[in-house]
Amino acid sequence: MVASRRRPKQDDTAQAPAASAEELVKYYREMLLIRRFEEKAGQLYGMGLIGGFCHLYIGQEAVVVGVQAALKEGDDVITSYRDHGHMLACGMDPKGVMAELTGRRGGYSKGKGGSMHMFSREKNFYGGHGIVGAQVPLGTGLAFSHKYNKDDGLAAVYSGDGAINQGQVYESFNMAALWKLPVLYIIENNKYAMGTAQARASAGELHQRGAAYGIPGVQVNGMNVLDVKAAAEEWVKYIREGNGPVILEMKTYRYRGHSMSDPAKYRTKEEVEKMRTESDPIDQMKATLLEGGHITEDQLKEIDREVKAVVTEAAEFAQQSPEPDPSELWTDVLVES
Amino acid sequence: MPIEVLMPALSPTMTEGKLAKWLKKEGDAVKSGDVLAEIETDKATMEVEAVDEGRIGKILVAEGTDNVAVNTPIAVLLEEGESAVENLSNIEESTPKTVAEPVVKDSGARPDATLPTGPSKGPAAAPAMDEDKFFAKTVKKTVRESLRDAMAEEMRRDAKVFVMGEEVAEYQGAYKVTQGLLQEFGADRVIDTPITEHGFAGLAVGAGFKGLKPIVEFMTFNFAMQAIDQIINSAAKTLYMSGGQMGCPIVFRGPNGAASRVGAQHSQDYASWYAHCPGLKVIAPYSASDAKGLLKAAIRDPNPVVFLEHEILYGHSFEVPEDEDFVLPIGKAKIMREGKDVTITAYSYMVGHALAAAETLAQQGIEAEVINLRTIRPLDVETIVNSVKKTNRLVSVEEGWPFAGIGAEMAALMMEHAFDYLDAPVVRVHGVDVPLPYAANLEKLALPQPDNIVAAAKQVCYR
């Protein structure tokens, strides 16, 4: 995938800035954690321990890991319901996330939110939203707060290629551009809005959807964490300079169905297999690490073991944590003043 | 340790399925993500992927088997170095359980099912407040000015409070409610939005999540229907969905109900819509002092508040306390006129009609007690029930439609809390169950008039 770039500055080498070996290993580990976590979530779903809707992020790991690498402390993150990866990338505790998936009191929302509704003020993660597109104005409001408070923060607002057709997204683009709000809109284009391929639902190019508002838009190879990070860093700088919003369209792919109950018959097995074998973000990073001599096979195996242990611990916690006390039914409806 | 591969649940409702096909055979190596088998559910054919790495040691359920219950072991996966012989000798060929067992464990605990609406049942009230002492020194103000004063005072008090909406700044408010705010507080805190209710309501909710205290003006609540998803799904529910972490202090305010001759799309009472939803407070003031004292309370409240004003009342004048500490408690009704024969409840513009009706009734020897609800949710059930215990009769008045309306809720509450005290069925006075007509005579027929209230009161008094 070629990144088509329209940018206001001269420097156009489009080269990923060199990341240190330590950073590369960090991205590998973060992506692997999301992958293994999601596989485990799928397994627990299969065992009936996770109910309802469960949307897995497998295949898209490079997007959130790459973008987060370009953010700093105090920046906000908000996304849709395919949110487990974002929470892990924000540094939220895998135990608390998994326990929320199983609906237990150790979960981030005490078991009352579920897969699609988790939050962490501490990590500036603002959800976890189940209504397609609703997080876009909400995230624009987070950005508004940064401007209102005159701090240096920004909001990273993730949405899918399906959400981008909602009217409220354009209402947000308009206000964000009008008021030069510090917001990075990330479209995670995994090619299918549930079962509808992009070409059947969306006219034109998604990264150009902000053009009428004067919002720069860039298409990025969302399967490569270094490409994602490079683009995010470049445009985060632009946003922090007070230039207003930016749209990054991440060309990515989800290997699993839209949710656990989606057999994904709208695409061929060959298509999925081709992405997995040729473009997998974790395999790519593994190759980069090995070819660059940054890591040995044994060290990789050690990371695999560590990540697996973290996920196993999370899954055990999520099963051992008790269900919420029945009295929790009535709490948190209103703040008692 | 060999790992059992279990029959997975592949949808929120699946309890069993058919093991249609094995794509791996005994002895095959598998890695995480490989497709092991295909399963037919009630809805679709799905693939089972391996989660762990290893080698298929044994297949326990043959392909083609129907009605395999979720969580039945279907195969055994051996890890590196494990031998099939030593590890599998004690694993039986499993006969698939064909009776689907409930998958999700349920503690069985339920709150007391006899409690219909919450833990603090029935008469529960906001702390009492000595309102009268503030009326020692008053000034005559319109509802419009009082709303403006409330916002200005709270904006001076708290830098996190800001107001946004269509025409609130340079135009000075479509109904001039925000007059002068731009001049005093500047464009950073008094923000003109594009005509984009869904968008700016959501934006304001996001700002509320971050700890700012937005006041969102809807030019009228009719247009807030564009934004109702953000009001309910984002503002009202997030505190609960976050387990108490993510509250949203925000006020959605603007004129509600029928103004005059503006037709069906601009004339609707949304009180019952918002009052239906847990997580919101809903206020509908009548007088200028209500408007000021309650809007200040709403801005200070840490919860999302829907504040329903009335266009016709904007220009009406009332005595308002001068003291800036005059803040009314949310959740407290006000007895506007005492009486012993019948209780009349009303809110917003209808309070005036109820008072007019009470005057007429007095001339006919019926002493009506008029209750200005002020807050629709949480409703001051205590004040209403205590009044009905005295009068034994209730007439509920609202501008909105009857079905599932505020009057319907009143009737239900009286069944629950005052049944033995009622000497007559509760009667509802309400807007006629049609979209509001434009023609002057039809519009008047569609909206409650004082005469309708008089007739209803006489009906419950059997007069």
Image: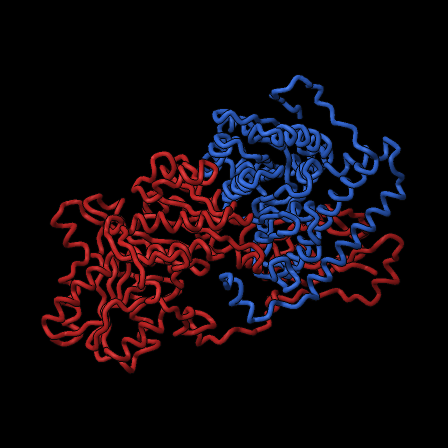
Could you say where residue B112 lies in the image, as x and y percent from the top left?
49, 76
Instruction: Name which residue lies at 30% across and 48% down.
Output: B144
Could you say where residue A78 lies in the image, as x and y percent from the top left?
58, 44
Instruction: Name which residue lies at 44% across and 76% down.
Output: B114
Above or below residue B159? Residue B171 is above
Residue A271 visible (yes or no): yes
Residue B67 visible (yes or no): no
Above or below residue B396? Residue B183 is above
Rendered shade, chain B = red
* Extreme residue in the bottom direction: B420
Rendered shade, chain A = blue
Above or below residue B232? Residue A64 is above
Instruction: Name which residue lies at 85% across and 62% down.
Output: B87
Foreground pick, A245 / A255:
A245
Could you say where residue B211 lies in the image, as x and y percent from the top left?
54, 50
Above or below residue B279? Residue B209 is above
Side of B307 relative to A11 (left or right): left
Foreground pick, A149 / A133:
A149
Quadrant of the rendered image containing residue A47: bottom right
Which part of the image, by quadrant, shows the N terminus of chain A? top right
Instruction: Name which residue lies at 27% across and 44% down.
Output: B265
Side of A52 relative to B174 (left or right): right
